[in-house]
Structure formats: C-alpha cells, structure tokens
Amino acid sequence: MPSADYAVYAPARPYFDLVRGALGDLVDGAHFFDIVDERIDDEVRYAFPGWPRVIHGRSALMEQFLAYSPI
C-alpha cells in the first residue's frame, strides 16, 4: 500500500517509529501503517480503556489510533 498523509496520527509517532525501526529491513514501507496488511487481526494483550481486545483489519486499526489525534 502506498504511503498516505499520516499527519493526523502525529501524537502516536513515537510508537510507530519504535515498531517500524525494530522491524528494519524485514518489511517494506516507510510508515507503520504502510506495513500493516488489511487482513490483520491485532490482538491487544492488555485492557486499555476504549480499545477492543481484538482489532480486525488495517482500517479498523487506523480508526483506533485516531483517538490519539486532536480533532
């Protein structure tokens, strides 16, 4: 998936950079969301208020991260 404008997710950038940096050359894509497949099932190991325990799909994950963005 091509890079998009992820400026709205700037508050979560430290997390994105950490994950993306840890993966290094093992994946293609500059941004965290560029490396996430639409068919992902993201299982959250800890109970965070407002977050589901399982997130199905890239777009649903992106929607969850909007909670960190002032709108």
Image: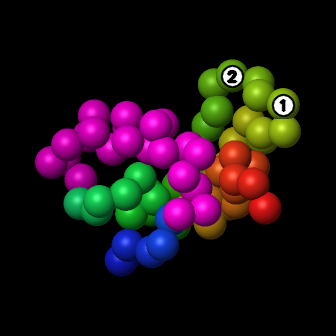
Q: Residue 34 is drawn in which quadrant? A: bottom left
Q: Which residue is mark 1?
A: 49
Residue farthest toward the right in the current orientation of the protein: 50
Residue placed at 28% from the left, 62% from the top?
Answer: 29
- The overriding secondary structure of the stretch rendered in magenta is helix
Give the magenta range: 7-27
Residue 45 % position (x, y): 63, 25
Whole-percent x and y of residue 8? 61, 62
Which residue position is annotated with label 2? 46
Q: Secondary structure at mark 1?
A: loop
Q: Amino acid at mark 1?
A: Pro
Residue 66 found in image quarter: bottom right
Q: From this viewpoint, which residue is outermost toward the top?
A: 46
In this picture, is 52 found above or below 5?
above
Q: x and y percent of residue 19 in the render?
A: 38, 38
Given this view, does label 1 or label 2 mark the residue nearer the observer?
Answer: 1
Question: What residue is drawn where x is 78% and y is 61%?
Answer: 71
Toward the viewer: 59 or 54?
59
Q: Residues within 10 Å of mark 1 (few under 14, many from 20)?
A: few
